[in-house]
Amino acid sequence: MIDELTRAYLQAVDQALPGYVRGLYVVGSAALGAWQPGVSDVDTLIMTSRPATGHDLAHLAKIHAEMPRSPHLDGVYLEPALAKSWPSDRRVLPFVVNGELRTDKPCGELTPVLWLTLQRYGIPVRGPAAVELGVRVDPEQLRRYNLDNLREYWQSTASTFPAELADVAPDAAMDAETVAWFVLGPARLHYTLAHGDIISKAAAGDYLAQLFPEYADLGHRAVRWRLGEAERFTTTDLVAAGESVNAVVEDAWRRFGK
């Protein structure tokens, strides 16, 4: 399915914009060997031969609008100059999220984690092996990004759960994807801080269990749901997910927040 999707994209973009895409690398869950049909999108890095013009962007928008809705082909477009500096400042550039091309917003995927994934696990669909790209990952930028993201996104969002769920029955059904997102996401960032490497969401369940055994069952249930098993999550589970976020974030800052 991944091969078919990337092949369809390259065929469309080569026909509309010959010579524009000079490299395409699969990153994300597929590169980490944890891609799940029906759950995962296909994340890519797309290297171009020139900065995008208005003409280019119009064609790209049409191409992405006509791509399959599931799984989405998402990705970041990287022009030649940026493929030398490997920026991680989440600047404005063309990128695709949920299958939609965006051109006027900061790219949240433009982080040291993207470059680390590309450097170590990127799968070339077009272009040389990822190790030949000269990708540079600054260890300090990687550390700061993960620490700040843990506090500014994960912990900040999880802090709203108690008030939002105060009047909801403890056994009320909650969205499984939301629970799994908050159970597994912070553990992945903690792993990167501890080991300088990337793990999948599936592996994050085991890592969370090692860090905090009290959340082992919740982590393993989240992984089983991602694998397609029937798992029901409740208000109590989402509250526990928020508590696990706090535990992971505080431990990460205590150990790695110099």
Image (cartoon, rainbow, N blue to C red):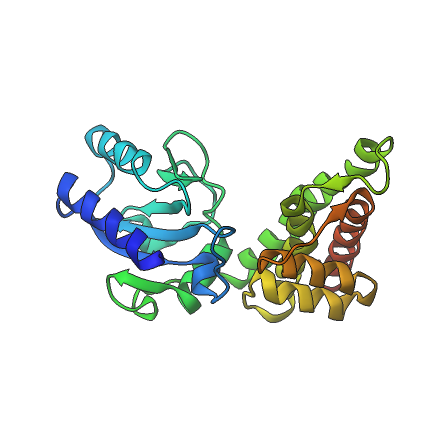
134 relative to 169, above or below = below
Q: Is residue 258 visible?
A: no
In what quadrant of the picture does the N terminus appear?
A: bottom left
Residue 226 in the image: state x and y as whole percent: 59, 56
Residue 58 in the image: state x and y as whole percent: 24, 29
| Residue 56 or residue 234, whichever sits in front | 234
Query: Residue 71 vs residue 4: left or right?
Result: right
Q: Is residue 250 visible?
A: yes
Q: Residue at x 39, y 54 (%)?
A: 86
Query: Residue 210 vs residue 110: left or right?
Result: right
Q: Residue at x 74, y 71 (%)?
A: 210
Query: Residue 97 vs residue 78: left or right?
Result: right
Residue 9 in the image: state x and y as whole percent: 26, 47
Q: Residue at x 28, y 48 (%)?
A: 81
Q: Residue at x 50, y 58 (%)?
A: 36
| Residue 230 or residue 235, whichever sits in front | 230
Residue 139 appears in which quarter of the rendering?
A: bottom right
101 relative to 192, above or below = above
